[in-house]
């Protein structure tokens, strides 16, 4: 059986962003089952599909007063 060589770490933080978004959505009771990371170049966040109840919950959460942008963002 050939030894497996681990892939080098990616230079982007797409996985971390996906996990951060998943946690932020969960705080509002929202789950996007297809939320994930695309492995293309550049890597993209896959938001995917959701049902109408999830879309309404997401729209409601986004309709709240926006947060102030962080300095340097």
Image: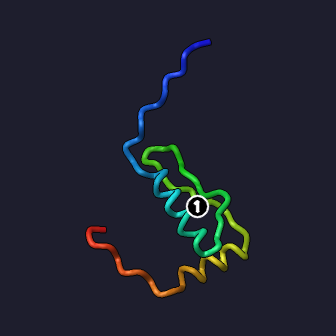
Q: Residue furthest bottom?
A: 65
**Label 1 secondary element:** loop
In this rendering, position of residue 60 left or right of residue 72: right
Specify few, some or many for label 1: CA neighbours under 10 Å numbering under 14, 14-19, or 20 or more: some
In this rendering, position of residue 11 left or right of residue 6: left
Which residue is found at the position 42% from the left and 37% from the top? Answer: 9
Q: Is residue 66 above or below residue 17?
A: below
Mark 1, residue position: 47
Depth check, front residue: 51 or 32: 32
Q: Is residue 11 above or below residue 45?
A: above
Residue 28: x %, y % from top left: 60, 75
Asked which quadrant contains residue 31, the reply is: bottom right
Which residue is found at the position 58% from the left and 53% from the top? Answer: 36
Residue 11: x %, y % from top left: 37, 43
Q: Is residue 6 above or below residue 11?
A: above
Which residue is found at the position 36% from the left and 81% from the top? Answer: 68
Quadrant in which the C terminus appears? bottom left
Residue 26: x %, y % from top left: 60, 68
Q: How is the image coloured?
A: rainbow
Q: Residue furthest left?
A: 72
Question: How many tags in the picture?
Answer: 1
Quadrant in which the N terminus appears? top right
Asked which quadrant contains residue 33, the reply is: bottom right
């Amino acid at each position: 059986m050939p030894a497996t060589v681990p892939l080098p770490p990616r230079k982007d933080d797409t996985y971390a962003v996906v996990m951060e978004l998943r946690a932020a959505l969960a705080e509002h009771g929202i789950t996007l089952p297809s939320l994930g990371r695309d492995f293309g170049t550049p890597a993209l966040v896959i938001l995917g599909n959701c049902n109408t109840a999830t879309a309404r919950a997401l729209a409601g959460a986004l309709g709240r007063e926006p947060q102030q942008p962080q300095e340097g963002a």
